Amino acid sequence: MRTAERWEKEDGLVDKRKQSLRIPANKLSVEERSEVLTIANSKAYQNLPPCKIVPMLADKDIYVASESTFYRILRAENQLAHRQISKPVKHHKPNAYAATGANQVWSWDISYLPTQVRGLYFYLYMIIDVFSRKIVGWSVHEVESSEYAAKLIKQACLDEKTQREQIVLHSDNGASMKGATMLAMLQTLGVLPSFSRPSVSDDNPYSEALFKTLKYHPTFPKWSRFTDILEARIWCNNFVVWYNQVHLHSGLKFVTPLQRHNGEDRIIRHKRDLVYQMAKKQNPERWAKNSRDWSLPEIVTLNPNKKNNFHKQENYNQVKLAN
């Protein structure tokens, strides 16, 4: 009540609380700020950050200001940037590629298979279709080589009967991925290469998820390890058959990658939807909301950006699919 009465008086809406106008006792003067900027921009220190300038001044028995003060003044003057002559390399996020069907965007990587010899591994090469999650190519070798990778992508294109300029192949920045033999093969096949940023596994998520599924499979020899390369190849062959033809993929609404790859998943998911709709009609009181959604996205994007500005390959893929 008293607050309302004060508001009704003349100048009642003016805030009459005491404001703190105290100037900090340790505030630098204009001359001292100027000295900090002069030192930071001098020829001896212009390429060094404050974390190095302050100790070097201390070695000369000079103290002007603390390291945080140097940073604060440089920030206020818009001079807080990379101060060395050499500039760090900027790695931009790879282009976003959208697949509207199988055999448009592939992803591949190499993983280690443990052997019974400590420090010795076999190398598993795998190519996965981003849209269907089907493994379209794989091989196991004793070394990591660009030549083996080139042979694998060529065989995968032959098996899937792809055409020139139909496939985008995404991979990491390893030597095998960017080797001259591999790049020459991609150019020959008309395959567009795409690469992740260095040390960024999120740019190649489909291959990473595939290898996790592989190494967490109950039959994967975590402790016994592979005795020879023939055993490794036999096991990988059985895994690929299981993954493509038996594995109900959680990211595909529990259809197999082969069913998604061939388009059979649409009929399967439609039948499941009819079953749920019938069950809902028979017992509507048991359904608080809509029945389970069995739909899958019509477009699967690799490395989508916030603005969804896909590479022109998206339009090309859509045209090819329509034709």
Image (tube, helix red, strand yellow):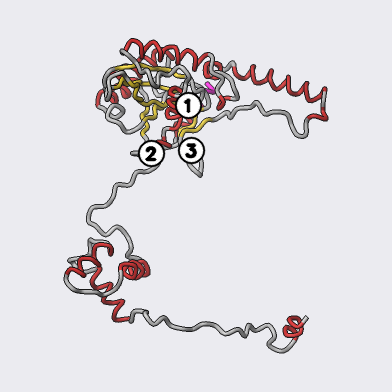
The residue singled out by tag 2 in the image is 200
Identity of the residue drawn at 41% across and 12% down:
237
Q: Main secondary structure of the magenta part?
A: helix
**Marks 2 and 1, how far apart at CA:** 18 Å
Q: Contact (CB < 8 A) between labels 3 and 2?
A: no
Seen in the image, is 266 located left or right of residue 168? right
Seen in the image, is 114 located left or right of residue 262? left
The residue singled out by tag 1 in the image is 130
Q: Of residues 167 and 46, which is closer to you in this image? A: 46
Seen in the image, is 12 located left or right of residue 299? right
Three-letter amino acid code at the position of disc 3: Pro
Any magenta on residue 257?
no
Q: Nearer the viewer, mark 2 or mark 1?
A: 2
Any magenta on residue 321?
yes
Q: Of residues 231 and 167, which is closer to you in this image? A: 231
Q: Compared to 198, does 104 lie above or below?
A: above
The residue singled out by tag 3 in the image is 304
Three-letter amino acid code at the position of disc 2: Val
Q: Compared to 19, does 47 lie above or below?
A: above
Q: What is the secondary structure assignment of the residue under circle 1?
A: loop
Mark 3 surroundings: few (<14), some (14-19) or many (≥20) residues within 10 A? some
| Residue 191 locus on image (x, y percent) | 37, 24
N-terminal label among 3 and 2: 2
Find the magenta span and give its range: 319-323
Q: Nearer the viewer, mark 3 or mark 2?
A: 2
N-terminal label among 2 and 1: 1
Mark 1 surroundings: few (<14), some (14-19) or many (≥20) residues within 10 A? many
| Residue 199 locus on image (x, y percent) | 35, 39
**Marks 3 and 2, how far apart at CA:** 15 Å
